[in-house]
Image (tube, rainbow, N blue to C red):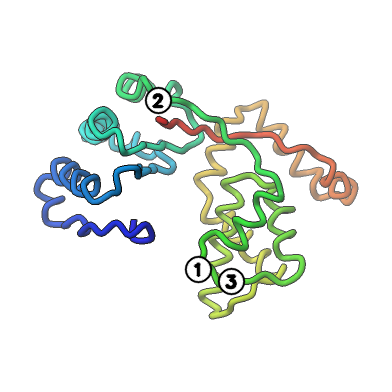
Amino acid sequence: MQRRRVEVKPLAAEALAREPFAAFDAWLARVEQAMPSAMRALLCLDEYERLQRALDAGWGGDFLDALRHTLQHRPRFVLLFTGAHTFAEMGPAWTDRFISARRVRVSFLQPDDVRPLLTKPIPEFDLTYAPGAVDAVIAATRCQPFLVQAVAFELVQFLNEQQRKEATPADVETAITRALESGGEYFANVWTDAGAGGQGILREIARRMRSAEWKSELPHVGCYGSNEVAARA
């Protein structure tokens, strides 16, 4: 909001502690008043499936009701839920509240789309890449959106820790290792969703990837897969 020069006081922690949903709605009203008339705001809930834990604990329903209230009564705010599952897969607690949501499938990106995301994600981004570093990210992730984001995040974190401004292919390898650890829940979800048959296929892929023959075929292997995005226009 600051980059768009919309000046709004941050949410007060004390107000949230007393009346979280009322305080949040009142804050959205202030944001709405401060926004230029033609502007719309995006509220993104990444990995929204984690909210299921709140539902299971007994208090998440109130939060989803608050989101539905925003959806119905604040048309200048767009709710974006991103994750690996559809609302239908999550169950009636989701479909009943967000029946008007539209689902958009996000598949693998193209290399030409990934390059600017890595080199200039925001105008003030000042990290640079040594020759081969960007290609190393593309080769490792196959342009899968989550993996690109995970590796890029770990790469920036690592360079900040090292107090350096240029990423090398070796740095990318370090970032990949870190992303495999920090993204554990994602990979566990992929493994679980694959089922017994799919897990056998994944084991075979992993076995073949250790061979030089399989690695030589990688540039010719197509990219398939998707995340699910439920959004309201």
The answer, for residue 177, to whether it is visible in the render is yes
> Residue at coordinates 57% horizontally, 57% vertically from top-left?
179
The quadrant of the picture occupied by the C terminus is top left
Residue under numbered circle 3: 127
Between discs 1 and 2, the one toward the N terminus: 2
Residue placed at 62% from the left, 63% from the top?
Answer: 119
Q: State the image coordinates of residue 173 (x, y, percent, origin top left).
A: 68, 64
The label nearer to you, 1 versus 2, is: 1
Please say if 56 is above or below 217.
above
Query: Residue at position x 79%, y 47% from top?
Result: 209
Residue 124's disc is 1
Which of the two residues, 232 or 213, is positioned nearer the viewer here? Answer: 232
Marks 1 and 2, Cα distance to the nearest angstrom? Answer: 34 Å
Q: Can you tell which mark lies on residue 169?
A: none
Q: Residues within 10 Å of mark 1 (few under 14, many from 20)?
A: few
Give the foreground label among 3 and 1. 1
